Image: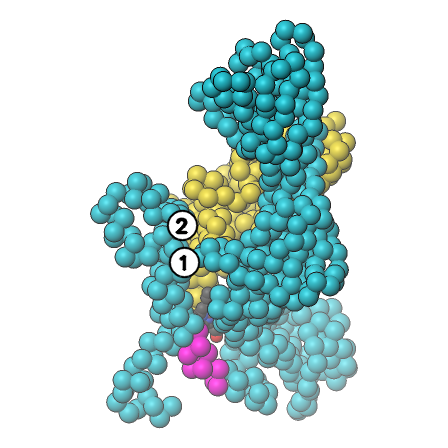
Chain colours: A cyan, B yellow
Amino acid sequence: MSRKKKPKGLFDKIWDIFSSVRLSVLVLLLLAATSIIGTVIPQNQLPDFYFHKYGEVLFRVFTTLNMFDMYHSWWFRFLILVLSMNITICSFDRLPHVWKIVRKKPSFDVEKFRRNKDTQTFKIKGSAQEKENLVIALVRKTFGHCVVEQKDGGFILFSEKGRYSRMGVYVVHSSILLLLMGGMLGSLRGFEGSMMIPEGETSSQVILRNTNEARQLDFSIRCDDFDMSHYDNGAPKEYRSDLTVFENDKEIFKKRIIVNDPLRYKGINVFQSSFGTLAGNGATLAFTSKDSGMVYERKIAMGESLELPENLGTFTLNHHSNSYGYMGHDLGECFIGKLTHGEQEPQEVILPIRFNGFDKMRKGAVSVAVVDYEKRYYTGLQVTKDPGVWLVYLGFILMIIGCWVAFFMSHQSLCVECQTMGDTGCRVMVSGSANKNRMGMALKIKRIASLIKDV
Amino acid sequence: MTSSLILAIVTFVYGFSSVFYISSWIFNKKILARIGAALAVVAIFGNIAGFILRWVESYGHGYGHIPLSNLYESLVFFALTIAVVCLFLEWKYKNSHINAFSISLAFLIFAYASLKAGQGAGDIQPLIPALKSNWLTVHVMTCFLGYAGFAIAFGISIMYLAKKALSNNGKGLMGRLPDYDLLDELTQQTVMFGFLFLSLGIITGSVWANSAWGSYWTWDPKETWSLITWFVYAIFLHLRHVRGWNGTKIAMISIIGFMAVMFTYFGVNYLPGLHSYGKG
Ligand code: HEM
């Protein structure tokens, strides 16, 4: 208190600014307004993309202001820092005062209650003494524990509850600090990246998302199998990988992961996130001779060359591709090979999986088609480590509890006074107050009053 | 009876209910509001029946899931939560004019849902792998309870502003609306209800994202807009509780907040980026 009287120093001025709700409203407003930017400008794209989209000048300006990764920009972090300081200092400013109210011995002042504008006064039959126990029982049941003070020809009853609800707001505010701390811990000590492991192979290398750097895990993961299933209408139903974890070449455990059910080991989480197919190791091809009409089925490995019967030439299987552009169309997944015949120019042979008769269009002496091939999937895993999650979750729980307390509970007190009035009965006053939700308290007073009328 | 038929009928029942509530206010006849309330109860039961039947039907399609997986289904649930909260408030505060505007919101939402259904958005679809989680149910339900709170706060704020602008000395049509104090109080109560559930909605969404993708916050536009909405209502609460704002100013902020809710719900689909969910 003495601080107020002295002329204010710089420290006090700054303290006042940071303990003001005016500043919180301003910062929250700025956070809300600037957050919109990142939902309008796509974030974390390649520079090329922005250059084309915004032109050189805007590109420069936006780059300087970190608009392309604004939620991690210095100015956005600065706003969050100001918010945290605001919450902290505001709490230090008010908490001692509130704590005093919470801890002090309840003291009741009938006069104050009498003056309250929600006070209900009425008369009932019978004397105060007769009614005392009934009224006490009623208040105990509908409101809570009470103390009774005897006086000439009557009694006064006080009750109070919900003192600690005044702390609800501080629980909410600390929860926000916990969230921010958890988030910071996560971004300092955690990482996020991906792995692509072909079926049957083992890897311990994660490619980090933002930097594309490689990072080694302390353990390695083998993808034993990847599989997916579809609904009747073709929409994907489930992606699934069977993984085995190895540590120092020793098998530790196996786990089947699906989307929403990750593998967790040593603080590292491994999620199913994507998949793809890999060049098959080879294929079974059908060679149809145009002259004889004979069909020869042959198994061929990648890179292998095959002498064809009927002196049709030599076929080499060169590679496999997940897409192949042909005259402006994507033929999809293809094998690509080469056909050599004596002194003639070698011919490229394209074998799209989806269009099996495609090679007939070449109108060569032999046409080639894919009969069967070995398909190998790789599983795409998202790998994350976030040591701050537990702080964040603790913050979540506290926030909900704190909001509940702050919104729906209040520090209420109730006072009932009964005074015998000769033989006619007694005069009753019911009054009360609350630090919040006065209308709710007024309704409560009315209800208790009407119950007392009936005792 | 199919769920679509039931839900189509429910649209009309909500419509009639609003008509009765509004007539009760215009003609100052209590009985009309009673009928409105009875119709609203019928609509709510129909709404629940349609919801459950749709759930059952999805099993018939071979991919049973709670109907909270796309825009149409979320609208149906949204209207239900609004109607339930409206009736609760009417019962608690014993004032039927509170609902003159708010029940119409349930009707408008249902009408919009039916319109969308007419364009094929009402088909029952299988769940994509990412949505197969129990968190989906909790997340969507809490979000929409929050939105319902804000929607009603919006209805009441509009009522407040209308009364302020058009009332002549508290008589006539506008005078019959609830007291300024009650409207003000109700705005605050419903915003607090909404804030609690929006917080829960954001939290369950984060926990879900963390269990499905390994990060609880990625700043995708839907997440960011829900956070913006949350900021707006945090501002509301502080101005109201700490700086003592009330009346017109507080009604305006509640309306701005609801604009943010609407943008989070619908507008985000027009922005770049994706939230796997809620696309029309
Ligand atoms: C995202 C940030 C914030 C959130 C979500 C938040 C949330 C809340 C909530 C829910 C309440 C309770 C309102 C009620 O009584 O119904 C509250 C009250 C309050 N907040 Fe915050 N708050 C935030 C930031 C701040 C900051 C930065 C300050 C710093 C000055 C602040 C100061 C207060 C004060 C003084 C109260 C009233 C305490 C009382 O009733 O005595 N808040 N806040």
For image coordinates 69% across by 82% down, the residue present is A146
Which of disc 2 and disc 1 is earlier in sequence? 2
Amino acid residing under circle 1:
Tyr
On the picture, is A295 further left or further right than B160? right
| Of the pair B27 and A56, the residue shown nearer to us | A56
Q: What mark, if any, has residue A43 been given in the picture?
A: 2
Verify CB contact (< 8 Å) between mark 1 and mark 2.
yes
In the picture shown, does residue A383 fall above or below B2?
Answer: below
Q: Secondary structure at mark 1?
A: helix
| Of the pair A368 and A85, the residue shown nearer to us | A368
Looking at the rendering, in which quadrant would you find the C terminus of chain A? bottom right
Density class for disc 2 (Cα within 10 Å; few <14, some 14-19, many ≥20) is: some
Residue B60 drawn at (x, y percent): 77, 31
Q: Report the predominant secondary structure element of the magenta stretch.
A: helix
Q: Chain of mark 1?
A: A
For image coordinates 35% across by 64% down, the residue present is A74
Q: What mark, if any, has residue B60 been given in the picture?
A: none
Q: Quadrant of residue B10?
A: top right
According to the picture, the residue beneath numbered tag 1 turns out to be A71
- Regarding residue B125, the answer to whether it shows in the image is no
Residue A63 drawn at (x, y percent): 30, 54
Q: Which stretch appears magenta?
A: A87-97
The verdict on residue A328 being magenta is: no
For image coordinates 55% across by 77% down, the residue present is A167
The verdict on residue A92 being magenta is: yes
In the picture shown, does residue A125 fall above or below A102?
Answer: above
Residue A386 drawn at (x, y percent): 56, 65
Looking at the rendering, in which quadrant would you find the N terminus of chain A? bottom left
Residue A73 drawn at (x, y percent): 36, 61
| Of the pair A229 and B273, the residue shown nearer to us | A229
Amino acid residing under circle 2:
Gln
Q: Residues under labels 1 and 2: Cα distance?
A: 9 Å
